[in-house]
Image (cartoon, rainbow, N blue to C red):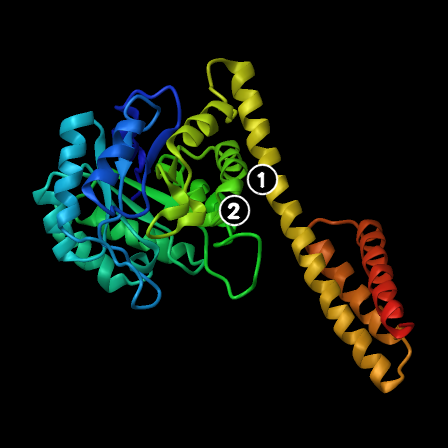
Amino acid sequence: MENSKEMRTWLDDLGLDHPLVIAGPCSAETEEQVLKIAHELKDTDVNYYRAGIWKPRTRPGNFEGVGALGLKWLQKVKEETGLKTATEVANKAHVELALEHDIDLLWIGARSAVSPFIMQEIADALEGTDKVVLVKNPINPDLSLWLGGIERLYTAGIRKLGAIHRGFSTYEKTKYRNIPEWQLAIEFQNKFPDLPLISDPSHITGNREMIFDVSQTALDLNFDGLMIETHFDPDNAWSDAAQQVTPSKLVQIMRDLKIRKEDDSEAAYTKELSNLRAQIDVIDSQLIESLGKRMKISDAIGKLKKEKNVAVLQSNRWNQILGAMILEGESKGLSEEFVLRMFKAIHQESINHQEKILNQ
């Protein structure tokens, strides 16, 4: 994929004056539901109407989609509203059925993207198609696996390609359903700046109240578009109720988002500055997250010291840490003075945490 510019053509050809928007319900539930949402999205910024037909569920027994029947409903969406249609495919049979029903955009989900075998099967089934095909990031933060899946499609002759960033699974509890790991998306863009990159804030957040903020971060990081799950009655949706918004809320989100256009040199400067600042914000957030984890470990050490009646300050250990971090900092272009000040502050906060436990 040395020349990724050709893969951007499909997006440029849309001639949009706003980010690409893919919206619709997490799952197609009934024909009435699919068509009602579509008509409410008809005269908005939505470019592709999405609906999950086959739903990969973590555990059996949950709603797993209506199957091929839903493809006929999507055909009606196109006939009645003119909206282009999109759905997820996970194997050869899904691809063949989607192509048979003239679905305009196919995306490959995180659970499928994690398997080179599945990606190759789908690539073989799609060989030569002129449909738009987007690949969600694998569930684990593996950039080469993500890129590898896209490369398999490219090798099969598919040129209308793009990627969807939907966050990554983690065993840790965070405010996100799937942690963004923005630095991986940034690295993805650095490797293939002309490959369209879409944000999926619905799956990143798992919470409709956070969708706007994540969408804004994505646009500040120069993402090309958004995939937002939309339902006329989100609370009673058959799947992922908490992360879906109403059509009117989607319109409000798109209206409130700050979209920076590159019309002149001043706008280009502002856009680049905004992008760099957004990258700093991502790293700052990671720093706070890491420091919070470090202090939890300090709390555990404090409890152990209290149990064994050991003093908080261990000078030898502190000197070892400081020496190692100064050398590490130098290798990263950080001055000794800065590393000393930073780690003295961290060490003092750690001591405060442990003393609080010992004095309880």
Work out which quarter of the rendered image holds the C terminus and state it.
bottom right
Mark 2 falls on what kind of element? Answer: helix
Indicate the quadrant where residue 355 lies. Answer: bottom right
Query: Residue 227's mark?
Result: none
Task: Please name the residue that numbered disc 2 is placed on.
Answer: 182
Residue 113 % position (x, y): 31, 57
Lateral position of residue 241 relative to residue 307, left or right? left
Between 349 and 30, the one nearer to me in the picture = 30
Between 61 and 300, the one nearer to me in the picture = 61
* Residue at the farthest left position: 100
Between 131 and 339, the one nearer to me in the picture = 131
Indicate the quadrant where residue 277 lies. Answer: top right
Residue occupying the point 63% across, 51% down: 286
Question: In the figure, 329 relative to 106: above or below?
Answer: below
Residue occupying the point 35% across, 30% down: 20
How many numbered dots are placed on residues in this image?
Answer: 2
Residue 269 % position (x, y): 56, 21
Lateral position of residue 258 relative to residue 147, left or right? right
Residue 181 % position (x, y): 52, 51
Query: Residue 279's mark?
Result: 1
Q: Are marks 1 and 2 in contact (CB under 8 Å)?
A: yes
Can residue 6 be seen from the camera position used here? no
Query: In terms of sequence position, does the residue under pointer 1 or pointer 2 come before the other?
Result: 2
Lateral position of residue 151 relative to residue 211, left or right? left
Lateral position of residue 34 relative to residue 336, left or right? left
Mark 1 falls on what kind of element? Answer: helix
Residue 265 % position (x, y): 52, 15
Three-letter code for the amino acid on which mark 2 is drawn:
Trp
Distance Cα–Cα, label 1 vs label 2: 8 Å
